[in-house]
Image (spheres, rainbow, N blue to C red):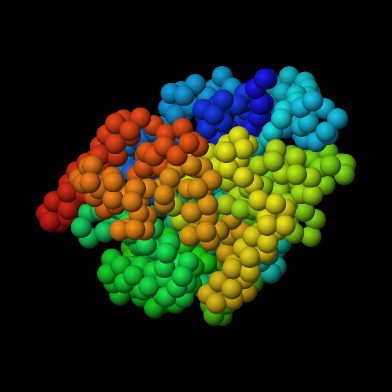
Amino acid sequence: MAPVTVCVIGGGPIGMVAMKTFLEEGFQVVGFECRAYLGGLWRGTEDSTISAHTTTVFNNSKWRSAFSDFPFNEDADTFPTAAQILQYLEDYASNFGLQEYYNLSTKVLRMQYSENNQKPWTVTVQDLKSGKVRTQHFDKICIATGAFQYPRWPKLKNVETFQGKVIHSVDFHRPEEFRGQNVLIIGIHGTAQDVCVALESHAANHVYMAHRQGLLLLSRFREDGATFDSTTLKETLFMAFLNKNFSRFYWWLTQKGITKQSQKTYPNIPEEWGLDPAPSIAVRPPVLGDALWRLLNSGIAESVPSVRRITGPKSVELSDGRILENIDSIIYCTGYSSGGMPDDLVFSDGTETAGCHPHPPGYEFEEPHLYRNIFPLHENEKIRMSLAYLGLGFVPVPGFVQYEMTAAAICQIWKHRTPLPSLREMKDWHAWHLKERDLLQARYSPLDKSTFYPVFLNLPDQLKWIDWASGAGIYQNLSSGWVNWRAWKLWLQDRQFYNLLQNGVFTPAIWRLFKTGKRRAASWDECKQMIISENKRAETARQARLEASLFGSKK
C-alpha cells in the first residue's frame, strides 16, 4: 500500500512538531514555509510580519516549555530569551532532520479538494526565489501557520493630525530611532513590556503606557526560588477536576491565589498606575511583570489612562482629561487578531472546499468554526478526515508540548486508531464550546471588546481529549488516585518514581511515558531518566536562586 502523503503548511515550532510527529507515524510528509528559514516568528525580521523582539523572554520556564523528547540545554536561561528559543528550534530541526522535508521560500497559493483525484488535495505553491508555480497532490493537509495573523489597530480619534511616527509593534525593529524621544505606547501587556525594555536600553527620554483596564502582575519566580509554572501533575489534574465540576469556585480560588502571590511580590502598587482592579484571569492572563515593575517604579515608564483623542501635532488627551505634550511617537502594542490562516492562503472556489476555512464570511476574527479548533465542520466526511488546523486552540499547559500532543491526536485520528465523532456530535461540541465562552465572558469581562482570545479552550475538556485522542495515557495511568489500578501498580513497582511523577515538575517527557497502543511512547528507561534529570536540574536551579536571595541578590 502506498504511504499516505501529508502536506504541512508552516515552518514555525507548531509546523515543525507536526512534521516530526507525522514522520514518526509513517506518513510521507512535505512541508512548505514561505520564509527562507525554519523557526517562524522566533527569528527577528525587519518587515511587517510577526516576529519576536530582541528583548522578548519566553513566558514559561525551560522545564515546562520543551518538546517531549528534546529538553533545553544547560546554557539556556531558566526563562529562555527569543534568541535561545530560536537556537533550540534550530537544534530540534537539525536533531530530527526536519530540514530535508521542507521547501523553504515557498508560498502556498491555494488548496483544492476533488474526489476525482487519486490524492484528493491539490496544493499550488510558488517558489519565491524563481517565481515558478507548481502543483502537488496530497492525501491530507495540516495547516500550522499559527493563530495570530493581523495587527490590531484601535482607532485613535484625530490620529491623522499627529505629526510624529505612528507604528504598530509589528514594525518596531530599530529602538535606536527613538533615542531621546517621548513615546506613547498604547497597551500595557507583554509586548508593551518588551518594547519598553528596548526603548529604555536605547535611551528614550520618557515612555507613557496608556491602557483602559487593570493588570495583574506576576513574578517569574516564587519566594522559594521555584519558577511560577512549577506545577505538578497532581495539581494540574486536580485543578482540571475543579474547573469541570465547580467552575465558579475554581476561578475564585485561582484568582485569589494568584492575586495573593502578586500582592506579596509587588506590594503597595500606587493607585495612580491604574492596575487595580485587574480583569479575571478567566478571560485575561496576568503578565510576567518583573521588567514592567522595575520600569514603572524607576519612572522610566509611566502608566496612564487610555487615550481619548489626539489634540495636536504632538499632544494627546487622556480619558481623565490630562494632556500629554511633546509626544514624538506612538506605538500600538495592542496585539493581533486571529484569522486562522494568512489572507493569501486560500481554498479554491468550489462546492467541495466551501466551508473549509476556520473563519467563514461573517465570522472573521471570532472563534474558529472547527471541532476542537482543529477539524472543519464540513458536510463531507472525507474532508473532515483529511484537513486539520494546528495552533488555533490553546489551554494553559505551558510550552510547545500541547501542540505536539494535538499533532499526535491528529495522527491517531488519521490512522483510524482514535475515532472522529459524527458531524452532529462535532457541531454539538462546537455549540457547547461557544456557550461556555459566552458564560465566562459575561461573568468575568468588565469591558466591552476586552481581549478574550478566540483560541482559548476549556481546560478539563480539551486536556482530557488530547490525552485520550493522542494515546498519551496520563489520565488512564495516573489519575483518579486510589481507584486507578494502573496507578496502584506503578506505585507498588516504583514508589519513588510514582511520587516524582505526581509531585515533581510536570515535565513534557511525561507525555511520552506510557504505551497505550496509539502514539509511539519513548523507551521507559530513557523517558524515566529524562523526567528525573529535568526535575534535578529544576531543583538545583531553585536551590541556587534561594541561596542567592538570602544574600540579598536575585538571579
Give above or below for 69 relative to 435. Answer: above
Depth check: give the residue in front, 405 or 14. Answer: 405
Tell me where residue 343 appears, x and y as whole percent.
Answer: 74, 44
In-front residue for pair 430/257: 430
Q: Residue pushed farthest bottom?
A: 321
Is residue 120 among what the camera can see? yes
Q: Is residue 308 left or right of residue 475?
A: right
178 lies above or below 383: below
Q: Is residue 188 above or below residue 27?
A: below
| Residue 420, horizontal then vertical, whole percent | 64, 47
Residue lying at 83% horizontally and 33% vertically, measured from the top left: 115
Asked if residue 266 shows in the view, the reply is no
**Residue at 65% in and 29% down:** 6
Quadrant containing the N terminus is: top right
Q: Position of residue 105 (x, y in %)?
A: 65, 26
Q: Which residue is drawn at 28% across and 56% down?
A: 221
